[in-house]
C-alpha cells in the first residue's frame, strides 16, 4: 500500500494500539516514527529496534506521549471498552496543544467516511495513533490492525486519486 501521499504514522511503541500502528505502517510500506521512553521500555520489555523510534530523556511515558502529539498533524485514538490512563493523557495533550483529534471506539464507530473526511479536512500527513496497551485491552492489537487496514487503505487510495 505504498502511497505518494507521504503519510507518516507516529506512535510510541507500547504494546497494543501503538505497536499495531507501527506494525501496520512497516508492513504496508508507510513511513513511521515516534518517541519512546528512555531505555526503549514498554510493558513487555525492550522495544525492538526494528521500530524507528527515538528515545526521550525520561522513563515517564507521558513525556513521549506529549512529544508524539506535538510532532503530528493530528491524533487518532483507538479503544474498545474504556480509555486507560495513557490514552486519556493523549486526549488531554491533543486538546491542550489544539491538535485535531479523532476518537474511534471499536464496536461503536463504523463511519469510515467520516474519518476519511476528517483526514482530508485536516490535511493529515503525520498521524499519531494511540490507545490502550495490551494488558488493558487484550484484543486491541488485532482489532487495531483490522481497523487501520480499512481506514488508512481508503485514505491512501483517495489521496493517490487526488494527486492526479
Image (cartoon, rainbow, N blue to C red):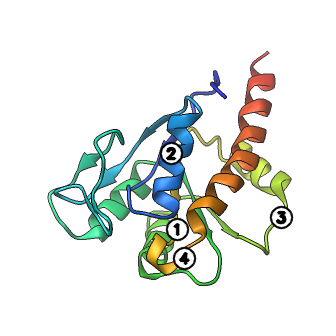
| Residue 42 coordinates in the image, percent (x, y) | 30, 64
* Sooner in the amino-acid sequence: mark 1 or mark 3: 3
Q: In whole angstroms, how far apart are the C-alphas of marks 2 and 1? A: 15 Å
Residue bearing mark 2:
23
Compare marks 4 and 1 and give the one earlier in the sequence: 1
| Quarter occupied by residue 111 | bottom right
Mark 4–mark 2 Cα distance, whole angstroms, equals: 18 Å
Please give the residue where the numbered disc 3 appears in the rendered image: 110
- Do the CB atoms of the residues marked 2 and 1 lie less than 8 Å apart? no
Residue position marked by numbered label 4 in the rendering? 137
Pointers 4 and 1 in contact (C-beta within 8 Å): yes
Q: Secondary structure at mark 3?
A: loop
CB-based contact (under 8 Å), mark 2 and mark 3: no
The answer for how far apart the CA atoms under marks 4 and 1 are is 9 Å
Q: CA distance from mark 3 to mark 4?
A: 19 Å
Q: Is residue 162 left or right of residue 100?
A: right
Q: Nearer the viewer, mark 4 or mark 1?
A: 4
Residue under pointer 1 = 131
Badge 2 density bin: few <14, some 14–19, many ≥20, Cα 10 Å: some
Q: Are marks 1 and 3 in contact (CB under 8 Å)?
A: no
Amino acid at each position: 500500500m505504498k502511497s505518494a501521499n507521504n503519510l507518516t504514522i507516529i506512535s510510541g511503541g507500547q504494546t497494543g494500539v501503538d505497536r499495531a500502528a507501527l506494525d501496520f505502517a512497516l508492513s504496508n510500506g508507510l513511513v513511521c516514527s515516534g518517541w519512546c521512553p528512555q531505555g526503549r521500555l514498554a510493558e513487555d520489555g525492550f522495544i525492538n529496534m526494528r521500530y524507528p523510534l527515538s528515545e526521550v530523556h525520561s522513563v515517564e511515558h507521558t513525556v513521549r506521549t506529549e512529544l508524539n502529539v506535538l510532532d503530528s498533524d493530528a491524533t487518532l485514538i483507538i479503544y474498545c471498552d474504556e480509555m486507560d490512563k495513557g490514552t486519556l493523557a493523549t486526549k488531554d495533550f491533543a486538546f491542550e496543544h489544539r491538535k485535531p483529534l479523532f476518537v474511534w471506539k471499536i464496536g461503536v464507530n463504523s463511519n469510515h467516511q467520516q474519518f476519511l473526511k476528517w483526514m482530508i479536512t485536516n490535511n493529515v500527513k503525520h498521524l499519531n495513533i494511540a490507545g490502550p496497551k495490551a494488558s488493558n485491552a487484550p484484543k486491541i492489537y488485532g482489532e487495531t490492525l483490522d481497523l487501520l487496514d480499512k481506514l488508512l487503505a481508503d485514505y491512501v487510495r483517495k489521496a493517490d486519486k487526488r494527486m492526479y
